Amino acid sequence: MVRIKRRIEGYYLVPLVIIATIYAIHKIISPLALKGLFLWIAGAFLVVLMTAFLLKLSSYVISYPLKKRIMAIHAFILDSFLHVYLLFFLAPCNIIRWQYKGEGTPILLIHGYLHFAPVWLYHMRFYKKAGLGPIYTMNLNDPFSSIEHLSENVANKVKEIVKETGKDEIYIVGHSMGGLIGSYYAIHDAPKKEGVLKVITLGSPFHGTKVANIAIGENAKEMRLNSPFVKALLKDIQKEKKIPFYNIGSKSDQLVIPQSSSFVVDKPERKLVLDGIGHVGLLFSSQAANQVVNWVKEK
């Protein structure tokens, strides 16, 4: 009999952590009114999480187009939990410098719009377990600057990594806007293109996204659908011969619209299309993390 080992996905574990924390607060606090409030909140969150899980199960027996709507709702519910987790659980961790030592080729992880370095903690567990690294994260610090300016911040970080490790080759992994920044850096700001072994992106809007119309900052303007910036970057990527690009995206991404914007490569072995996972969910997906590991290990 073959045993199938399954891992609980991070985008399910995170809501459980939130619910458990709220329930723990309910047990600790003494005012009766507050105890009831926190218990009610924990119960409501649990019902919402179970609804998402049941939607996921139903998607296996329902066909499109209804399945597409169900997966979109599933992704939206889980991403709502994940945003709470980022704000109240991971944001306080931003005071710590997150990196893992290693003997291999350095990997630099670049976060997205209005995010911060600790968003990579779930992925980093997979990378470390696979023996990759050293693994570095960074905070972009200038949240509303142009992508060109943010690429300069990446260039400064890479110089630090080269000085620290003595290695002038690197893998770039970027989520959302971080993938655009990493791509721009690799093509325009890297000291030598051969030094960037691969650029791997997760949910990066290479063709732009309609959601950027309601965001603020120069970088948000650049990420608008078919903006002059994304058109120029897309043309540069298509002409680039030395640096291989790899894309991960989701059909249920609610921030990259249209979802096809996450893909710039044609080769099927260089892209992974997921479903039922939201924009932030890509950072808590074992499928996405394992695919990054596989691509980095490929020669």
Image (cartoon, rainbow, N blue to C red):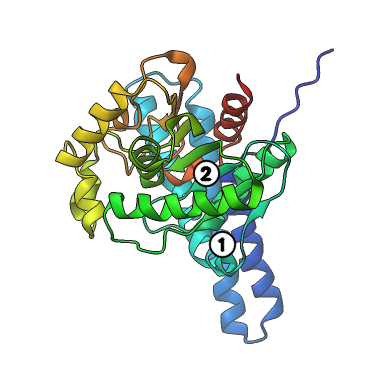
In this view, 16 is above or below 168: below
In the image, residue 57 sits, relative to residue 80, either above or below, namely above
Locate residue 7: give its quadrant: top right
If you read the primary sequence from the N terminus, does the residue marked by circle 2 or circle 1 appear first?
A: 1
Q: Secondary structure at mark 1?
A: helix
At x 41%, y 64%, the residue is 141
Q: Depth check: 51 or 237 in front?
A: 237
x and y, in percent, of residue 86 in the image: 51, 59
- Give the x, y percent position of residue 53: 55, 39
Q: Residue at x 43, y 51 (%)?
A: 154
Q: Position of residue 173 (x, y in %)?
A: 50, 39
Q: Nearer the viewer, residue 67 or 278?
A: 278
Viewer-nearest residue: 169 or 172:
169
Q: In the rendered image, which quarter contains the N terminus?
A: top right
What's the residue type where badge 1 is placed? Leu
Asked if residue 51 is positioned above or below residue 251 in the image, the reply reads below
Pointer 2 residue? 283
Left or right, residue 29 beside residue 208: right
Q: Are marks 2 and 1 in contact (CB under 8 Å)?
A: no
**Residue 245 in sight here:** yes
Circle 2: residue type: Leu
Say few, some or many: other residues with alpha carbon within 10 Å of mark 1 (under 14 / 14 to 19 / 20 or more): some
Q: Residue at x 64, y 45 (%)?
A: 166
**Residue sitting farthest toward the right:** 1
Gap between marks 2 and 1 measured at Cα: 13 Å
Within 10 angstroms of label 2, few (less than 14), some, or many (20 or more) residues?
many
Residue 296 at what x, y percent from top left? 59, 28
Dividing the image into 4 quarters, which one contains the C terminus?
top right
Residue position marked by numbered label 1 in the rendering: 90
Q: Secondary structure at mark 2?
A: helix
